[in-house]
Image: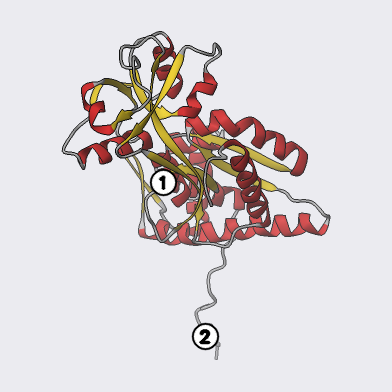
Amino acid sequence: MSKKHSEDKRPMEYVIDLKQLSYFTHVAELGSYTRAAEFTNVAQPVLSRQIRKLEIDLRQNLLIRHGRGVMLTDAGKILLKHSRLILRQLEQAQEDLSLSEGKLTGHMYLGLPPTVARTISLDVVQAFKEQLPDAHLTIIESLTVNLEEQIHLDRVNMGLLYNPSSSPTLETQLLAEEQLHLICGVDSPYAQGRSRIALKDLADIPLIMPSLSNSFRMLVEKEMQKLNLKPQIEFEINSVGVIIQLLAKGMGAAILSRSVLEFIPQSGLLTAIPIEQPALVNRLYLAYSSKRLPTKLQVKVRQILIDICQRHFPGRDD
C-alpha cells in the first residue's frame, strides 16, 4: 500500500537582494521612477527591471504605475515599512563595524535653506574633511517646507530649518534668532531718513519677496495679518541670490535677514533697516526625525552644526 505524501506546509523562503530593496524604497518614497532615478543616479530602466525582479522573487505586486508616478499596493506598503527598518539597521551595522576600527563612516544627507547654505556650507565641508574623513556628505539646498518633508520621508538625515512646524515626529533645537530687516539700496527712497521702520509702514512699500512657501515670507504675512494688513508684493522670486542682485541694482526692496549683505561683493550698495513694532524674528532650528535613535555619525554632525552656527549666528541669548 503506497504511502500518501502530505502537502509540504513549510513556510515560503524569500531571498531579498538589498540593492533591489533599496531601489524599491527610493521609488516608493519619492513617488516616481523619474525622481528616484535622479536621486540615486541610476537609470530608470535599471530601477524598473530590478524592482520587477524583486516582485517576482516575492510573488507580489508592489507598485502600480499611474499618470503622475507610482502608488503602493497593500503588499508594497507592508514591504516599505520593513525595508526602512532593514536599511537603517544595515547602515547602523556598517557604522558599528567602522567604529571597531576607530572610524566614523556613513552617508550624511544634510538639508540647508539657501541663505544658510551660502553662510555655512564652506565650514561644514571643511569640518567633514578634518573631523570625518571616512564619512560622505551630501548637502541639499531647499526651502524649509521642502526640507521638513524630506526629513519625514527619511531622504534627509538632518536639517537646519527656519520656523519649522510643530510635529511629534520632528526633534528640534533652537540654534539662532535673526531679526529681519528691510533691505534696499542705499539711495532708495525707502531708506532716506530712516534708521528703523514700523511693521505697519511696510504695507506701503512694494516688495520683492520669495513665494509663500518661504519662511521669511510666511513670517511677514503672519505678522502683518495680525495688524489687518497685507504686504504689497511687486515681484515673487524664489531665489535669494537673484533678489540680492536686483536690490543691489536699485530695483526694489525686500524683507530678509541682515546676513544677506555678506553676499554682496561690493560693500555699501545696500542698507538694512531694522523692523520694529513688532520686530520680525526668524528662528533657525536644528531638526531631525524622532522616529529612530540617531547614529553616532549623526550625533557628531549635530555637534559640528551647533558649533558652526554659534560662530556665524552669535546674536542669540541662551
Residue 12 shows up from this direction: yes
Spot occupied by residue 50 in the image (x, y as percentages of width and height): 54, 44
Q: Around disc 2, counting alpha carbons within 10 Å, would you say few (fewer than 14), some (14 to 19), or many (20 or more)?
A: few
Outermost left residue? 228
Name of the residue lying farthest toward the right: 101
Q: Circles 2 and 1: CB distance less than 8 Å?
A: no
- x, y percentage for residue 117? 54, 32
> Could you tell me the amino acid type at mark 1?
Glu
Tell me if 146 is positioned left or right of 197 in this view.
Answer: right
Does the rendering let one see residue 68?
A: no
Q: Which mark is residue 149?
A: 1
Please give the residue where the numbered disc 2 appears in the rendered image.
Answer: 4
Which residue extends farthest bottom?
Answer: 1
* Quadrant of the rendered image containing residue 100: bottom right
Q: In x, y percent, where is residue 262? A: 54, 22
Mark with earlier residue (2, 1) = 2
Residue under the image location 43 percent in, 46 percent down: 148
